[in-house]
Amino acid sequence: MSVKAYGAYAGDKPLEPMEITRRAPGPHDVQIEIAFCGICHSDLHQVRAEWAGTRFPCVPGHEIVGWVSAVGAHVTGFQPGDLVGVGCIVDSCKHCEDCASGLENYCDGMVGTYNFPTPDAPGWTLGGYSQQIVVHERYVLRVRHAEEQLAAVAPLLCAGITTWSPLRHWNAGPGKKVGVVGIGGLGHMGIKLAHAMGAHVVAFTTSESKREAAMALGADEVVVSRNAGEMTAHAKSFDLIVNTVAAPHDLDAFLVLLKRDGAMVLVGAPATPHPSPGVFNLITKRRTLAGSMIGGIPETQKMLDFCAEHGIVADIELVRANEINTAYERMLKSDVKYRFVIDNATLAA
């Protein structure tokens, strides 16, 4: 089936309207009419070939929400009309230890929602900046939010799970002091989720102007990281710091804020490496510097259910398809609070 989409034919070209082909639903497939798709910073990196291996034409988008329009003969968990989401994963090997553990995001055979090899035309996956997508039922998620919240649910499929996974893995909750570095698309979700989990949340920002906004998101305290006095006041006090910044920066400034056995988890993906941290800041307090990548399908479903129960959605700005290139430029300037979401109905305009 031919559907309308928005993508790029080269890394130095703007995104533009195009038509792509979607497969007919197989026995275990779910066909989804996409209502909204979030714009992730990784979309920009990949479509502009700032990350290696971009295949063109590239149709980005892995924060997808919409309605089921058809299901394969053997699908039992979904039916037409269901409100659903698709995140960063549309396939995996299904039999390795990671897949068996519900951690498909770490499967060596994981297939991303766009720019990954697939038997479908044109030979690689095409993402959610499109009218429709067909996905194996295993990788489809149920959305239990109210329908009027649907656009703001979309970023949960990447920004939400990317921060939820380390918060859950490192046991954020009552009695824990949790830092969130960066107040952007990822960071604003980290603050909301850590607050809802019951942790004492400290937001780190380089800008004094974001102090009030961070408090409104649920931060108990805000630290301007350029203020040495504010940073020193929190030395050796954090159980966990989730670092969402996608640009190289001094990690040592935050490692020294961890208490003994504390962990800093990197979830931002800079185009070039961070400066190497000092080993003594790790070994003298048995601190951990770790990484985390999105989440598996079961934990993504738990995150969505938790967010529905607690009324959590992303703070978004809705854009039309013909505004995507402008949104990219604004995103580079951090001129969004905090996530752009495409109204996919405008793809047909």
Image (cartoon, grey):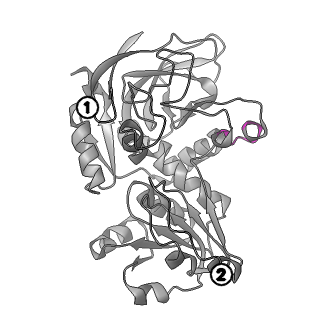
Q: Is residue 61 above or below residue 234?
A: above
Measure the alpha-carbon separation of dots 2 and 1.
Answer: 49 Å
| Left or right, 327 with reference to 40 | left
Q: Is residue 321 above or below residue 27?
A: below
Residue sitting nearer the eye, 226 or 99 = 226
Q: Mark 2 or mark 1: name the one nearer the start of the chain.
A: 2
The kind of residue tagged 1 is Ala
Confirm or deny contact between disc 2 and disc 1 (CB under 8 A): no
Badge 2 density bin: few <14, some 14–19, many ≥20, Cα 10 Å:
few
Residue occupied by mark 2: 280
Q: Residue at x 56, y 47 (%)?
A: 294
Residue occupied by mark 1: 321
State the extent of the magenta-drawn residues as a range.
99-104
Taking the magenta stretch, the answer to whether it contains residue 103 is yes
Q: Position of residue 249 (x, y in %)?
A: 44, 68
> Depth-wise, is mark 2 or mark 1 nearer the camera?
2
The kind of residue tagged 2 is Phe
Marks counted in the figure total 2
Taking the magenta stretch, the answer to whether it contains residue 129 is no
State which quarter of the image contains the C terminus. Answer: top left
- Find numbered disc 1 in the image and state the secondary structure of the residue it sits on: helix
Badge 1 density bin: few <14, some 14–19, many ≥20, Cα 10 Å:
many
| Left or right, 174 with reference to 314 | right
Q: Position of residue 279 (x, y in %)?
A: 64, 76
